[in-house]
Image (cartoon, grey):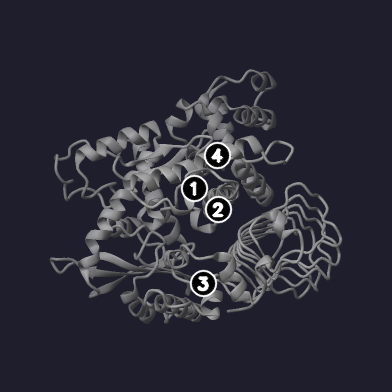
Amino acid sequence: MCVSAIESIGMNESHKTPEFLKNQGLYKDPSVERSFRNAARDNKALPKEERRNLPDKKDIRIQEHFRRIDQALEKKGDLFKILMRKRLLQEYPISLYKKDGTEDTEKIARLVEGLYESERDIAQRRGMDLGPLGDRFSPDLEKKYKQKLFEKREEQEHSLTAWLDYFESPDSSSYPTWFKYYVLKSLGKMGKRDRDHGTYSKRSASTLDPFPSIFRGSLAQVLDVIQKQMEGTLVPAETADTALSEQTSADDMATQTSREVLQELDRLAKKGDFPKLYAHFQNETERIRRENKEAGTKGEWMHFPKDSDPREIVALLRNKGTEWCTAGLATATDQLRRGSFDIYVTYDSEGKPTVPRIAVYVIDGAISEVRGVEDTRQNLEADFIEIARTQYKQYKGAETYEKKEADIARLAQIYEREEGQELSVEDLRFLYEVDTPLSDFGYGKHPRVTEILAGRDVREDLSKALRCRPDQISFTSEEALAGGVLFHLGNIQINNLTILPENIKLPEYVGGHFNLNRLTTLPENIKLPEYVGGQFELGRLIILHENTKLPKRIGGNLYLGSLTSLSENTILPEHIEGNLYLGKLTTLPDGFKFPSSYRRYRVYLSPEVDKSEAFEKE
């Protein structure tokens, strides 16, 4: 086969993959083989004989595999993502069930006792009073630690879902498919972060730790390192052993990084060691953030217009501990194609504006994001909220940030109360997000919420907040589906039912994800929860009855990817925090309007659908 024929299958720059994927044996995967054979079969430009006798080109096989994945995402994106999510959530978190769906009692008993012994050993080493741990493993302790075990599994699922949500969102559009595959594959092997050794422990089949947290800036820098290693530009040919020369280009990988560190990063990138690369940039970010805390609030705004040179913003953000993904050249390039940035930088010890503290990202004159450097979740520092407001209030959508400011102020007021002061019903409803999601400027749950609620009796708190009996609060899917439940804390997974019973009674509030992905239809008179805090998954639902009332609020994505039609009377949720997937809809009813709270770019429809008239004019 001639080179041009090979290139016609898969060898192009947009799907170029690093050497380590080949060296790690990905080309042997049966799915890669299928992709390549199908590509050859479908390519009519090749003679039949050449289609039957393909050369063993490992890199082309891998590139073709990712090209076909991109095609699948474009044509059947919703279905592909749902299937991928389902597979990873089954394979990656610790398995506590047998293939028939029943609990693996032998494994659970072993893990429960191991969890108890581990906590008991830690308490003894620290010289703590064993208290309720006691001298022996009693039936009551077994029940308590079994619940802890299932909570740990849910925490694993939640931490993995955060990655899947991010990689499905427009925020990650600059990452190539091979990179997302590489990261997710790596996460399945990563346990607990070891800051002293700069890496992660290896994950085993019995690991109970959650999956690593998302550090968006660190992730973007890992991609930059790998791409520069592929190009051969990571380590400059002539560099001093101390700092890089002033002549180094603005987008070079480490303006203040020693040659030895660059050489080590080059080695890790060539090897494809994601855990060590990721941990390196996490450690660097945290170190720089600590150093920058003393910079004060005096500074100035810098404007980076749409389509401006991304190397300029990367030069400003590189090695500054922001944790903004814009610090990566690929992400900055993608974001500046779509919008502009206003970045507030404070003065360093020499009086120069070099320390980024606030980023306001604007698309088509409307605020897309406001980010800070308070923590890894990119919250605004308290002293910078007013500074940020003076800047973003000039753009469309500024009013939506008023709630964020109010929620942060209220959270700070609760957090700063004297120790031992009782939380009111209103406080509890706010902290447990009973009435509305708690809004802030960062990603995920605010760490102060976790700190305030640590060690509290959750069942007692929720029964007080909802003015209901403790037995109306559930913690397992079995409890939630038994009826009579008002609030379910955590996720509900219904994996073994293709049809729901007509008389099923679901909780009014579901704090986590609600998975009904095997259902193709719902009972006509079913009463769905008023609120789902995480994803609401109905990915195989074909028919939605006119009188079916969807939840008012959904804290994650709403998956309706198999739905082929909507009625003009369909009432969608008032608010969806994530994305709405309606990929199989070919038309919208005449005059149909999405709720005003929806963002146009977060509603995924078939390319055939013109959604321009389905959103309120701004």
Query: Horizontally, is 154 left or right of 508 in the view?
Result: left
Residue 210, disc: 1
Query: Horizontally, is 598 left or right of 238 in the view?
Result: right
Nearest-to-viewer mark from 4 and 2 = 4
Nearest-to-viewer mark from 2 and 3 = 3
Q: Are marks 1 and 3 in contact (CB under 8 Å)?
A: no
Q: Residues within 10 Å of mark 1 (few under 14, many from 20)?
A: many
Q: Are marks 4 and 2 in contact (CB under 8 Å)?
A: no
- In the picture of the structure, the residue carrying the numbered disc 4 is 111
Q: Residue at x 50, y 65 (%)?
A: 456
Looking at the rendered image, the quarter that the C terminus falls into is bottom right
What amino acid type is highlighted by mark number 1? Pro
| Secondary structure of the residue carrying numbered label 2 | helix
Q: Residues within 10 Å of mark 3 (few under 14, many from 20)?
A: many
What amino acid type is highlighted by mark number 2? His
Query: Horizontally, is 286 left or right of 168 in the view?
Result: left
For residue 492, which quarter of the picture? Answer: bottom right
| Secondary structure of the residue carrying numbered label 3 | helix
- In the picture of the structure, the residue carrying the numbered disc 2 is 158
Q: Earlier in the sequence, mark 1 or mark 3?
A: 1
